[in-house]
Amino acid sequence: MKRTHYTSELKDAIGKEAIVKGWVHDIRLMGGINFLLLRDMDGIVQITAPRNKISPDILKKIEGLHNEDVIDVKGTVQKTAKTKTGIEIIPKNIEIISASEPMLPLDPRRVTKANLDTKLDWRSLDLRSPENLAVFKIQSKLMESMEEYLIKNKFMKVFTPSLIGGISEGGSEVFSVVYYDKQVFLRQDPQLHRELLIAGGFERIFETGPSWRAEKSHTVRHMSEHRTIAAELAFIEDEHDVMKMEEGMVVNALEKVKKECGGELEILNKEIKIPKTPFPELQFPKIYDILKELGKPIQKGEDLNRESEETLSDYVKEKFKSDFFFVNKFPFAVKPFYVMRADDRSEWARSIDMVFKGTELSSGGQREHRYPKLISQIKEKGLNLDSLKWFTEVFKYGVPPMGGFSLGIERFTMKLLDIENVREATLFPRDTERILP
């Protein structure tokens, strides 16, 4: 049978015949009347089978079904006050497309709870839950709306390499890969290639894709592979142009989710609050004073840690009534060679993080586009000039002021929906212990 409707479309088919396809979400055999819940990508519909109205063959088929069997149902759509959706289907025919084994290793209904490792071991079954489908529909809408915003602002979508011939940020947290007869690395972040595109005259570009860090972090917000949406723009005045573009993108995404994902938000019992712009901005070195006043001091010149981010988030929430804020003017010593100093001799950099609900979502800022300064900073960081010539040489030939940001997609989803572990906002997470499925 050819599908005529998804479950979300059945309200337009009341009184008509429809064919739906999906999984058996649940079965209730009540003697005089049997109920079957069919689940597809849009939701769940009740199939109602009164014994005095349904053929014995259909009743026998229903009684022989198991949870997660894949079926199609042909029947009449009618109104009812007994379901949440206000509709049900009276079946005329049921066909089993693919039978499931009766004993499931995991319950997609979440009636029987499972720990995180079991969920991830059986990820395809776990993803069948309406709650998980809601999470990833919202994540998809976030991506769609962020890309939409950038495209409307004259950004061009690009693709940069995942394999690089050298370490781009000077650290050791990279995965090496055998590439024919040589060793190369999975990118930590394709930052340098985005800058090369600006140098190539593209002016406004963005990309989405994975990055990798060989960081042995065992936390609820770190993974070895993560995805970002990253943008770079030319002819900026300073890092505040970057901040304005990023906060506009974020607000557009939240507005779209609030408007277009009402059903998913209801399933998850979440409400989206649209933040006011501009987002509050905290700057170093004043941040050290704020943390000291709040009883959580860190040494001057040090980077923020998780406790600092959470403390500052509480401070911003109380003072500015905002879940979002920017941190600016990080110590240059803790940032990569390509960031621009706040001024020629400053110990502070035009480097920004965006923090949301106590967690860093993105990093970015203004890049150093002046060749002599770039070379000086590479030397200052103790990096090999020759190994970076592939990047630096073009800066001799006229590169405009530029800046950009890279925002973590899984982290954004996690914090927006108050998910405890970033792995549950990732379809197939990769971390220090997990490389399958």
Image (cartoon, helix red, strand yellow):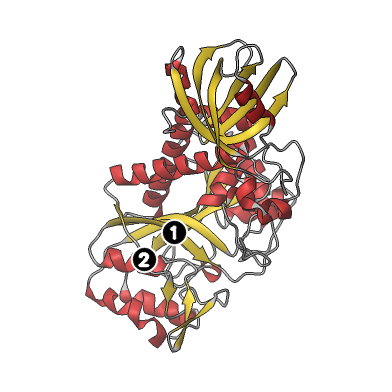
- Residue 281 versus residue 380 in the image, above or below: above
**Residue position marked by numbered label 2 in the rendering:** 160
Seen at 37% across and 46% down, the residue is 147
Depth check, front residue: 291 or 9? 9
Q: CA distance from mark 2 to mark 1?
A: 9 Å
- Residue 336 versus residue 361 in the image, above or below: below
**Residue position marked by numbered label 1 in the rendering:** 209
Q: Determine whether label 2 and label 1 are within 8 Å by CB.
A: yes
- Residue 188 versus residue 304 in the image, above or below: below
In the image, taking residue 344 as reference, residue 137 lies left or right, namely right
In the image, taking residue 359 as reference, residue 203 lies left or right, namely left
Depth check, front residue: 96 or 84? 96
Seen at 48% across and 61% down, the residue is 210
Depth check, front residue: 88 or 326? 88
Q: Residue 152: percent from the left, percent from the top?
A: 29, 42
Mark 2 closeness class: few <14, some 14–19, many ≥20 residues within 10 Å: some
Indicate the amino acid at tag 1.
Answer: Gly
Indicate the amino acid at tag 2.
Answer: Thr
In the image, taking residue 300 as reference, residue 338 lies left or right, namely left
Q: Quadrant of the N terminus?
A: top left
User: Which residue occupies the extreme bottom position in the image?
Assistant: 181
